[in-house]
Amino acid sequence: MDERAPLAVVVVGVGHLGRHHLRLARTLPGWRCVGAFDSERARLEKACAEFDAEPLPTLEDAVARAEAAVIATPTVTHLEVAERFLAARRHVLVEKPIAASVAEAVAMVRLARESGVALGVGHVEYFNPAVQAVLARAPRPRYLEAQRLSPFTRRSMDIDVVLDLMVHDLQLAQALNGGAPLREVRAVGVPVLSPRVDLANVRLEFANSCVANLTASRVSADRVRKLRLFEPDAYHSIDYAEQSVSAYRLVRTAGEAAIEPLDVKVEKAEPLAGEHLAFQRACRGEAGPFVDGEAGTAALAAAVAVVEAIAAANGP
Ligand code: NAD
């Protein structure tokens, strides 16, 4: 592979999110979009017409033409689609959650490793410039609080709110804790408008003693996306939607403690484009912020632990 040539990329699944992946595959430098595939022909043709991409007749064509694939099909199909590309030594960026079960995620990671290709997972919030600005400060939180509330949309009904929304904050909580394992998970969750859990709250304790309190809802009146981090001598509050950070630090002078504002600069950018650029770097074997298959599997394993804790709390 010529390290400087644009990579041949395909998008598989051009529904709600896949359309945005196709737009970026067609417009971002570093990509040469060789087409898209979706099992629903009418949707494929509409999306391809909108973004001037080639509708591919079969998944085999997509595998044959691509060096890299972005997969945005329903979660239950991630492994069956991804393994076709991975087995043919194509790099894969698969939407989050990585797969429908930890066993499937582990199989996907193993296949990527055996094939020697990059495997990324679409935890797009990690690429929010506000998150990257806070991560760059190497925070050591003692306590985290996240709220991710959305109105009901009927999308992602194949999974519950933990795998749908909370998995973003689980991945971020893990990244902010340097991958420390979980020590305790206590959770509550209820189905509201769907047969699956639509509203969940969890208290996680990491092995480094950090506590995270996460709330996710897909039946909320308002849309809220916030994360607050409490450190012994600093506080950061991230507004994902605004891509802004407000921060304060504790300063001690001559025995007197004072709270001072901290200026955390955030350069606004589209998180999904940041995710694509990170995937390109990984395809080229370059270092940089990236949510790889292992991190995606760890986030899924945490989500499964939350789901199990909810089931245990709800009883038989
Ligand atoms: P969607 O239903 O709108 O789109 C999925 C598309 O995949 C449809 O067009 C469908 O026809 C197609 N498809 C289904 N099975 C296929 C197959 N085997 N081969 C090819 N195409 C197939 O779903 P969506 O809301 O776009 O979600 C897709 C994925 O993205 C899910 O895993 C979801 O969890 C994830 N997602 C991530 C975020 C995020 O913030 N990162 C947000 C929404 C959804």
Image (cartoon, rainbow, N blue to C red):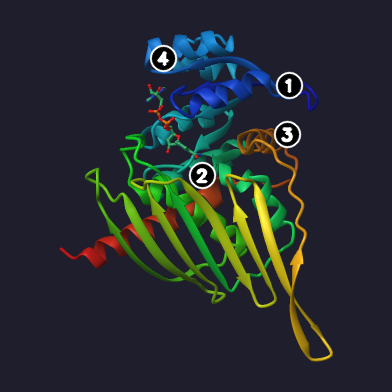
- Image depth: mark 2 or mark 1 in front: 1
On residue 43, the disc is 4
Q: Quadrant of ligand 1?
A: top left
Regarding mark 2 in the picture, which secondary structure is present there?
Answer: helix
Question: The C terminus lies in which quarter of the figure?
Answer: bottom left
Disc 3 to disc 2, how far (Cα)?
Answer: 19 Å
| Residue of label 2 | 110
First along the sequence among labels 2 and 4 = 4
98 or 249, nearer to the observer: 249
Which residue is the site of mark 1? 6
In this view, the mark in front (1 or 4)? 4
Which residue: 42% across, 46% down?
222
Q: Is residue 88 visible?
A: no
Q: Mark 4 near ligand 1 (CB under 8 Å)?
A: yes
Q: Where does the image place residue 154, in percent across and percent down from the top left?
A: 32, 35
User: In the figure, 303 relative to 288: above or below?
Assistant: below
